[in-house]
Amino acid sequence: MSSVTETPGTGLPMSRINPKAIVRWTILFIGGVLMVTPLLYMFSTSLKTPGQIYDLRLIPSAPTLANYMEVLREGDFMRWFINSSIVAVVVTASNLFFDSLVGYTLAKFKFRGRRFVFIAILSTLMIPTEMLVIPWYLMSAQFGWLDTYWGIMFPGMTTAFGTFLMKQFFETVPDDFLEAARIDGMNEFTIWWKIAMPLVTPALSALAIFTFLGNWTAFFWPLIVTTSKELYTLPIGLTSFAVEQAIRWEMIMTGAALATIPTLVIFLVLQRFIVRGVMLAGLKG
Amino acid sequence: MVHPTESDTIPTHPVQPAPRLSMRTRSAIWVWSFLAIPVLFYCVIRFYPTFNAFWLSLTDWDLMSDAEFIGFENYRRMFADPGFWQTFRNTFAYLIYGTPISLLIAFVVAYYLDRVRFAHNFLRALYFMPYITTAAAMAWVWRWFYQPPPTGLINSALGELGFGQIEFLGSTTNALPAIMVTAIWAGLGFQIIIFMAGLRAIPDTYYEAARIDGLGEWTILRKITLPLLKPTTVFLVVFISIAFLRIFDQVYNMTTNDPGGPLGSTKPLVLMIYQTAFSSYDMGYAAAQTVVLFTILLVVSLLQLWILRDRA
């Protein structure tokens, strides 16, 4: 172990030799391990037989994938996984398109009513989802959207948060670029799509990650709008599965693990982008 | 899809109308064709439902018969209902204990983590990971932790160490804090990252100047770091407060056998709204409860604006 002397040249020389820094690092490390303990125990228990779950050891004595086989056989997890994927992907694509189209229009065009449209969209941030679900439910019942993909998706197809975020970023795109394209005879849609969009890819990836994760883990509205098992998203399916299993904790932990694995994979692959995205959105939003 | 050749072929056609349409008009046509679908969306999916919710709150409606206008009767009923006041107190209990605890832990971790160079990304990932998990799934893991012995991890561990057992989710006094801990845990990762971003945004020159002046670490923290971090802190206070005021996923999943129980001791406003609307189908009354939630959230947001205006 090369320990604390890694990356010389960065940081204060003091903190490298300082034993206090080592103590601090150790405490932070223990805290970090505590943070992931629920995840570790979830995976550990999902690999245990019913007889072993009272065993407190983190590493199962005889790990088995039998629970996973049984859960995949009994629950509709594959179906819920597909439902969640469809919902999250479609809503994300829609937000990338519409949020940036509107954000761009508000940032780069001067027109009558611009301020009004901007404030009207921004004001919807003040309205909590919980206040809208009853009208949405009634609307869905009337139009036959209950228990459909569209019913799950429609409330999130474009968001004020995303529009505001994209507007902030399009404001940093120099007008000269767009003017030059105009002189070249490009139409406005092409200018947005081909010239402006590629210049804001960091914002687009942040928006994509947020929207995808937000919809993947969404609970309240999908719980209300879906009633048949075939249309459940993963979180709703997991809840119904866990209620059925009652006290079979190894099965419940396996279901929870199946619901969590996709987001963990996304996180491990895109860690840098996700953290940067959170910082971007947190500072701008 | 717009084909690249299209712009070459088009001129023959618009050459005649072009002189008549001024630059301004053409630009306005583009603007409104870009905005048409989203504006329609906002009207139908956001604005109309907002007014609809206010209107419904003044009606008595069970979905079977027609909605009947009853003025402020729903509000009178709500304010006279001890069950409402209990959920009101519960909601604020989540907020009043949850927010400062979250903020303190997040700040302390961010403050020290920011200065760690060795394995920085690894440590950060450990703290951040819970944030991207599904709340419903993690609520079940915590629910299992809280079970009585020999099932529950915490009570079994306490037993091994020779301590007595604690009743968590079955107790009217301990259930709310137990659920709150789960919610705090789930939110920390985000708050730590935001605090770290705020700390990085403070220019190094401030710290250098302070060191030249011979200020100690504690003084630097109090006189420089905390005041300059105020916008971040205010943002997080509001963000966390709103999250606690809207708490639902954890409570719902950790108390499925008696939602909001035992004896309503963990029930927050949103769960009450859910039950009133989708278990009792008392739509008017539920709408009135959402209006109360809206009002509380509005006050919190306005407080943020007011505090930040103070700076400018």
Image (cartoon, grey):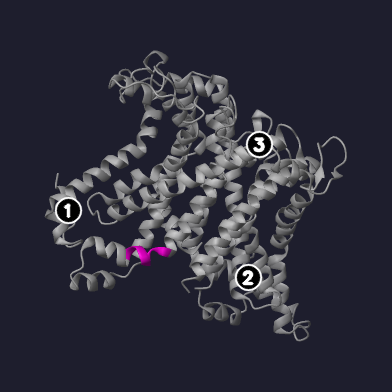
Q: Which tag is nearer the camera, tag 3 or tag 1?
A: 3
Residues rendered magenta in the picture: B225-230
Residue A84: x and y in percent read: 58, 39
Residue at horizontal 32 percent and vertical 23 percent from the top: B157
Q: Nearer the viewer, residue A70 or A57?
A: A57
Q: Classify A109 as above or below B275.
A: below
Q: Which residue is mark 3?
A: B82
Q: Position of residue A90 (x, y in %)?
A: 61, 48
Mark number displayed over residue A105: 2
Q: Nearer the viewer, mark 2 or mark 3?
A: 3
Q: Secondary structure at mark 1?
A: loop
Q: Residues within 10 Å of mark 2 (few under 14, many from 20)?
A: many
Pick the front one: A100 or A188:
A100
**Callout 1: residue from which chain?**
A
Cβ atoms at labels 3 and 1 below 8 Å apart: no
Q: Chain of mark 3?
A: B
Say what amino acid the circle numbered 3 marks: Pro
Q: Nearer the viewer, residue B288 or B118?
A: B288
B303 part of magenta stretch: no
Please report whichever mark, 2 or 1, sits nearer to the chain's N-terminal start: 1
Marker disc for residue B53: none
Say what secondary structure mark 2 lies in.
Answer: helix
| Picture quadrant where residue B3 is located | bottom right
- Side (left or right) of B266 relative to A188: left
Label 1, on which residue? A6
